[in-house]
Amino acid sequence: MTIIFLLIGISLTVALLFLGSFIWAVRSGQYEDDYTPSVRILFEDESPDKDFK
Amino acid sequence: MRETTQTLVQEKEHCYHCGDECSATPIYAEEKAFCCTGCKSVYELLYANNLCTYYNLDDTEKPGVTVKEEDVNVSHFAYLDEPAIQIQLLNFQSSTLHKVLFRIPGMHCSSCIWLLENLTKLDNGVLESRVNFPRKEVSIAYHPEKTKLSAVVTLLHKIGYAPTLNLDNLSGKKKTTNYSIPLKLGVAGFCFGNIMLFSFPEYFAFADEVKQQFGAFFGYISILISLPVLLYSARGFFESAGHSLRQRHINLDTPISLGLLCLFGVSLYDIFTASGPGFLDSFTGLVFFMLIGKYVQQTTYDALTFDRDYKAYFPISVTVLEKGQERTMAVKELAPTKRIRIRNQELVPADAILLRGNAFIDYAFVSGESVPVPKVAGEIIYAGGRQVGESIELEVIKDVSQSYLTQLWNNDVFQKNKSYFGVGTYADKVGSYFISITLLIALGALIYWVPRDTDMAIKAFTSVLVIACPCALSLSTPFTLSNTLRIFGQHKFYLKNGDVAETLAKADTVVFDKTGTLTESSETDITFHGEELSARDCSLVRSVLQHSTHPLSQSLYGFLQAPVLPVINYREISGQGTEGLVEGVPVQIGSAAFAGTAHMQSASTTLATRVYIRINGASVGYFSFHNHYRAGLKTLLTELQAQGKKLAVLSGDNASEKENLRAYFGETADLCFNQSPADKLAYIGRLKEKGQKVIMVGDGLNDAGALKMSDAGISVTNSVNGFSPGCDAILDAGSFTQMAKFLRFSRRSLNVILLSFGISFVYNIIGLSLAVTGQFSPVVSAILMPISSLSVIIFSVLGVRLVAWRMGLHQKTSNVTKS
């Protein structure tokens, strides 16, 4: 049963990775606007020569 | 571009750009109809840049915004290119990249997003533009060598999306975006979930083997995981509780913090002594659910205040000079480059450059310093400054910021002294009792259970502390009142804050000013008595009147027709009159005592409202005013009396109108005449000493003292009045007759609050009795608590709407401001 210690270690590491990515997502402002991206994705990019970021 | 929509447009003559119905003669371009040249020029601009997709994104609605000012010119925004201003405005600055964030209240649909994100096609210098629609913001990155900030702003104006450039943007303090609530929530949720996993052996009997082997290990891991919750997520509760304790006061977070600390302490004890698993799952869950409640509360409240700050405008007007002609205009239509005239005691509504006149600006409303500062032509005068002395001409350089005006209004300088008021808000009164009782019950439960079952004692103690959160007390009042304010706002009645609504509901006396409040100054009949005034005399008189804001001066100014001359040594003596030196001739205008002869003074007691004129030391005669009372005044007064309010009139005039007023006000009302501003103040002071709660209704500038002295001062504005933050509420003259209804509505809003208190007490009694008997675990009460808070919020919001609907206040009052 000692394998449980290892498993818990791994699961906590994975969980912390997710927590870290959540914190990164919040800090980079992804939770600030939950509407505009849903509209933006539907716009047709008419001029591929123009540089959209 | 596609041409499918073309036929549709031609059937109905709706503007191709903004969708408004076109007036008699639509303007045609490319076979499309436009309502105005502004819309047409936007279309042409977009067409030339191959951006007509703008019109095709949404079939049902035309996306365009009607363009108000047609001739925007880069030079109007040249000040934006000043390095000093740029430092404050730009988020990021380098030699190849500038970034700026604008708030654009005009954006409203997906086409707006599309166009704003394609700015780069209209201006090659723009590198990227990104819209945040919920916040109505666009962040623009541009190359400083290819374009300029002023050019970008001009472009936005041209396509109808004028950005708000206000002091908030320019204050230099970038709002650091607050991520703390989502982060705290995320951390608490993470810890809660993981601790639950480690608590599984405790939840299920079949895991007994695991529990025996790993129980202690799981316990220590749980402690480790719960630390971020204790130190980070729950910090807000502890800080707020600690803050209030330091001020020897108990607030709502006190019992919650106590419960949290207790749970955590007991869990530590349990785990370290191996006597049990502790309650760390409950502890983290509790914080998680309470944060959810806070988050919902925050977003709802933000939406409500956004409406108030950015969508509603005070019904106040300014005098605008256009091609030498004066005209009044609603403040919200004021745009940069407009020339405005600010008179004695009026407030500068937006940042502006002084063009003409001796400005003495008093920034008392902004800084609390009430020493007028002299300014010379060319200097910038910031919004909120008040002119003292003669009238000045200014050119507006920034848009009016409603949120800034609201903020000014709520400045501490104007907060009423609470001790005068003596009523206190319901929440304050009930709140402290409620919390003390909760603490007593929790303590009782603890004492009762400890000798019987220590586990149960802890459970009951924390459950009581958590479930008894007096949510209704803290939530229902702000939510109900902010909705009430919003509904009032739709009817052109603007309250400073929620407290004012409570005061209005509790008031028992209404005191009116006469001139300009009960009477309609625009409809006064004016006749001149005395020797015929020569054209030059008219001009002298009018020149002095130009600077005064008194309602009588204003109507006389409108009545006389003569050119205006410059005035020096202008002075206005409140309650008496104004004087000044015009072309070396002293002119005095005012009451009999001020500008009349001794003979006139003795005869003045029985006569109509008169304004005496003295030119070069000799009295030349007087203007007499025949008053028109506002239509609907009688009904308003009868209704107020039916509500049991005591009425009174304070008039600076003589008693000539006594009989008329008696007919309107009835036998019981107190009618006082010849009142100086100091008399009015003293009168209201006397009423308050008698314990009456007084509403004063008057003119914001001339009755400022009395308005401030009263419990709730309502300033009635019509097209000529400015904004004075001394009052507690602004009422548009057009809605004056609805005042009785407004008072009734605020009364009913308070009933909604009381009712929601009732609901919350029922919740609490049920919850507490279950908690005391130990039938709740803390985590169940932590789930129930936000649910009960939400139901109270929903009740108070819907309750106010329902009341408004039943009183017929749900419809917006149509735009009645005269201009």
Image: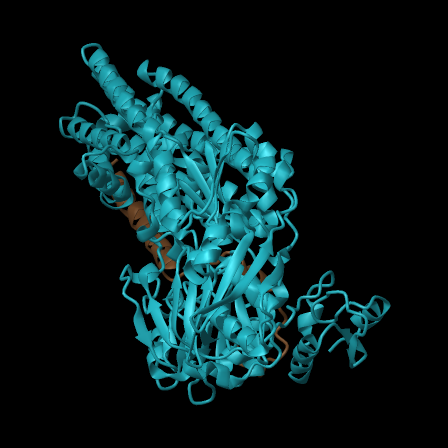
Chain colours: A brown, B cyan
Of all residues, the one furthest to the left in this rendering is B273
The image shows residue B411, relative to residue B102, as above or below, that is above
- Which quadrant is home to the N terminus of chain B? bottom right
Rendering quarter of residue B818: bottom right
Q: Indicate the position of residue A38 as horizontal and vertical percent values.
A: 56, 59
The residue nearer to you, when weighing B350 against B202, is B350
Of all residues, the one furthest to the top in this rendering is B452
Whether residue B776 is visible here, answered yes or no, is yes
Numbered circles on residues, count = 0
Query: Is residue B447 left or right of B558 when viewed as pictured?
Result: left
Q: Indicate the position of residue A16 as horizontal and vertical percent values.
A: 31, 50
Residue drawn at (29%, 24%) of the image: B433
The image shows residue B815, relative to residue B349, as above or below, that is above
Q: Indicate the position of residue B323 as horizontal and vertical percent values.
A: 59, 81
Residue drawn at (48%, 48%) of the image: B698
- Which quadrant is home to the C terminus of chain B? bottom right
